[in-house]
Amino acid sequence: MKNAVGREIPDDILRALGKEPFQGNNYKNGVPFRRVAPIIHPVMDNQHSKLVKDIHEALVKCKAHSGMTVSFHHHFREGDLIVNMVMEEIHKMGLKNITLAATSLGKAHDPLVPMIEDGTITRIEASGVRGMIGRTISEGKLKGLAIMRSHGGRVRSLMTGETKVDIAFIGAPTSDDYGNLRGIGGKTNCGVLSYSHIDGDQAEYVVAITDCLVPFPNFPAHISMTKVDYVCVVDAIGIPEKIATGAAKPTTDQRKLMMAEYCTQVVVNTPYFKDGFSYQTGVGGASIASTISLTRIMEERGIKMGFGVGGLTKPMCDLLDRGMVRVLMDTQAFDLDTVSNVINPAHHRISAGAYANPFNKGAFVNKLDYVILASLEVDVHFNCNVVVGSDGVITGAQGGHPDTAQGAKCTIVICPLLQGRIPAICSEVTTVTTPGESVDVVVTDYGVAVNPNRHDLLEALRKADCVPLKTIEELRDIAYSITGEPDPVEFEDRVVGIIEARDGTIMDVVRQIKKCDPKE
Amino acid sequence: MNPNMKRLRRSMMFLNCQKPSLIKDPYVYAPDSIMLDLEDAVAEREKDAARYSLYHALQEIDYRGVERVVRINGLDTDLWKEDIRCSIAGGCDAVRIPKTETAKDVQLVEEAVLKAEKEFHVEPGRTLIMAALESARGVMNAFEICCASSRLFGIALSGGDYTKDLQTTISGTGVELMGARQHMIIAARAAGVQCFDTVFTDLNNMDGFRKDVETIHAMGFDGKSIINPRQIPIVHEIFTPKQKEIIFAEKVVREIDSKRAQGIGVFTVDGKMIDIAFYDGAKRILALARASGVYKGEL
Amino acid sequence: MDILKTAIAGTVESSDCLVTVEPGSGTIELDLDSSVMRQFGRQIRKVIFETLGRLDVSNVKITVVDKGALDCTIKARVECAVYRANEMKDNLPWGDVIV
């Protein structure tokens, strides 16, 4: 059945998952549902100790079994050590058919590939997958499906019971012996524990893993002891330097600086740019550069930001330190400067649910004026693909992309026209992750395209004459005139992954990649 | 006269022909000219490789109106004649001669260019020439070089080799380049051709770069050779007339036109004393503003 | 043209390709590895064969490692390798078989 973004969703997939095809952004708006309540193992005995001597003991006490679902957060990003540590123990215990429900998986988790191949892990639920695991899934080696959800969508799926977590493992920079957890104060800090709040609420067992045990009470706790069953102390939970891989430093690449300048011009020449506006941006070189050039114009015009939200970076924290933004709402620290900025009283920690969950009574993303995003591909319908590479291999993550894109009044996607020979602006994205109805402006090095549904923005930018305006089709045509029109990537029939929309309907499917013979 | 003799050349960006990633779309940065380099940037054993890349880039890449100059190898090598054949066959807009010392050098290249134009059926005279002066002798001969060919649209200082020849080094203050710069701009203006400044290589010193560009702009140069696209916006900002200057120039031109009809020779505009001597300067500002895309008026 | 000896042109930098030609065994034997194989493999192969055709090369073992080069670069590298295999550098047929 074709869904609202024109993607064919196989009926057997819809049946097997009991899901509907995507029917537009607000399809589930106001539709009531009952939140699933977790099973709780109460602690009344004042002699009870939550400390376990190792991961193995934690697994045994939490009744680890084949077929269970385990969950993890990705606050340590490429510096994460927890997932591999726990999965190795599960593997040693000979458990099979595990569903790995991490908030995201990256190159740090390449060592899990053999566990996929031998049937230890048979299903993956994550925001997305980078590195070798992505390739392994695309090659069809995961027995079950990979379900890719946005950060907000993941919270929804735990609340509705669609994802039932048996054991949640929460890497905590500091914990006391009773499981009060904080993202700071230890030797391996990540600042916030936003992604794990929902796991604390919904999982049957919650195990805190820390490398820094502190005296009781570890307060104010980011995740409370009332939700934690066991505490396990290990040597190291993460490598902090790797939190910020590939980001941080301001770019000197003129192409990125140009796109950043276009982006800033779009922001300052659209009607939401006024005192108290709200803003989210990412970690790419152009996004960071545009935050810096935006700051200059805010100063010139005496405009201050009301709030900044999301994954945060140093330039956003600099705004806070200089009084240019009233508050920051933090779901993830993208660099160590942000981790240490968490102590600023106007730098607030929020849960992934408060940030982006479509199934609560209103999330922060709904209050966004601007969000600056990146994309692997954007097509002429303004659909974005941030999960599957143009070669058909899973290589990225939804993150908060669909959440913020729908929420923000003005969604700007920065995307160089070409990635090497690959046209990023194309006729049809390989896989839809964010629907075109959420995307308002696309900024490339060859010009800026405005979604024709946004006459208001187009008019404002035309009047300002501040950026080279093009239609999205013109951008696609320029790209194809340079590279030639790419052949469609060939897939097998088998579906290996699902791109879930925020509301749990199916946005697209990912199919197994066809083998490619170099001598053919 | 070739209509491109006097075209806008605020920024002339060097690109190594040996690097496909550099030559595939430099026009996104909107320099006025690119200088596709076969000379110093290309390793000795890749000289042949650079030509194939150059030829196909000239033939197949749409540089979207950016002028395509080729820097050929020096006349003291056995490479420059084939460089010219390749460049003309590819359809370049101009050839830059390195290490020019005499009018004879320009004429040698002019002959080879004409020969190649005939060989490859290019309209004779289509291809322009610019000369880089890289020695004390070249600078001393600036005027004869400027007058050497009707194809020669300008001269450029090449500061690295020039300062070596002077037995000094690039200091960053510009003091070692003062004489050459002053001499060359005078020679160029006397001969009615353009004059371009040398590169600024310290990319970490953008403030120093800005000062350098302000200096040569004030001296009367038409533009600057650049080595990184980051330098383009600064050059364009300094070389593009400001709105205030444009408005004033418009007033001057209109007033002189109308006062001349009334037989009045001297008058004031915005409190400044103006006479006919201001006319050409004001016209030039408007022409530069128009070419730079910031003036759409009718004057 | 014959391939008199092994010759190499290009690099494996982004947007470039590395072309190696060696004396063949009677036919054109192409070994292509490309970072954009799935989308552009067919077109790259076509450009290589057309370029060899213009140069009248029909007996060669040619290996191409492509890193997303545009067609103009692929042509340039193939031509360069073939002319190097013949030690030819001057008076090349620009605009004739090199087009």
Image: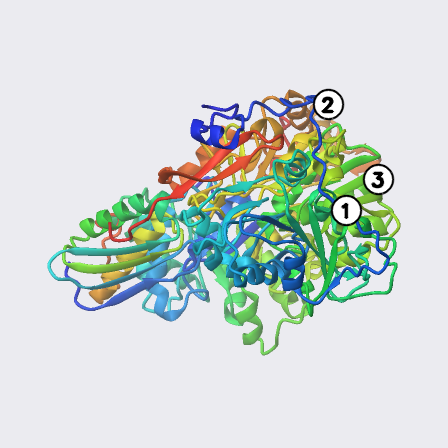
Label 3 Cα neighbours within 10 Å, binned few <14 / some 14-19 / many ≥20: many
Label 2, secondary structure: give it.
helix
Which residue is at the front of the view, A444 or A351?
Answer: A351
User: Which residue is nearer to you in this view: A83 or A129?
Assistant: A83
Q: From mark 3 to mark 2, how far is it between C-alphas?
A: 56 Å
Q: Which residue, given by chain and number where applicable, does mark 2 sit on? A: B262
Label 1 chain ID: A
Gap in angstroms between the C-alphas marked 1 and 2: 72 Å
Mark toward the viewer: 1 or 2? 1
Q: Residue furthest left?
A: C26
Q: Residues within 10 Å of mark 2 (few under 14, many from 20)?
A: few
| Quadrant containing the N terminus of chain A in the rendered view | top left
User: What residue is shown with label 1?
Assistant: A330
User: What amino acid does circle 3 point to?
Assistant: Lys
Q: Residue at x 79, y 56 (%)?
A: A179
Viewer-proximal residue among B201 and A110: A110
The chain identifier of the residue carrying mark 3 reads: A
Q: Would you say the residues marked 3 and 1 are in contact, meaning their CB atoms lie under 8 Å apart?
A: no
Work out whether B265 lies above or below A213: above
* Three-letter code for the amino acid on which mark 1 is drawn: Asp
Mark 1 and mark 2 on one chain: no
Would you say the residues marked 1 and 2 are in contact, meaning their CB atoms lie under 8 Å apart? Answer: no
Left or right: A193, with B43 as reference point: right
Q: Position of residue A16 (x, y in %)?
A: 48, 32
Residue A304's tag is 3
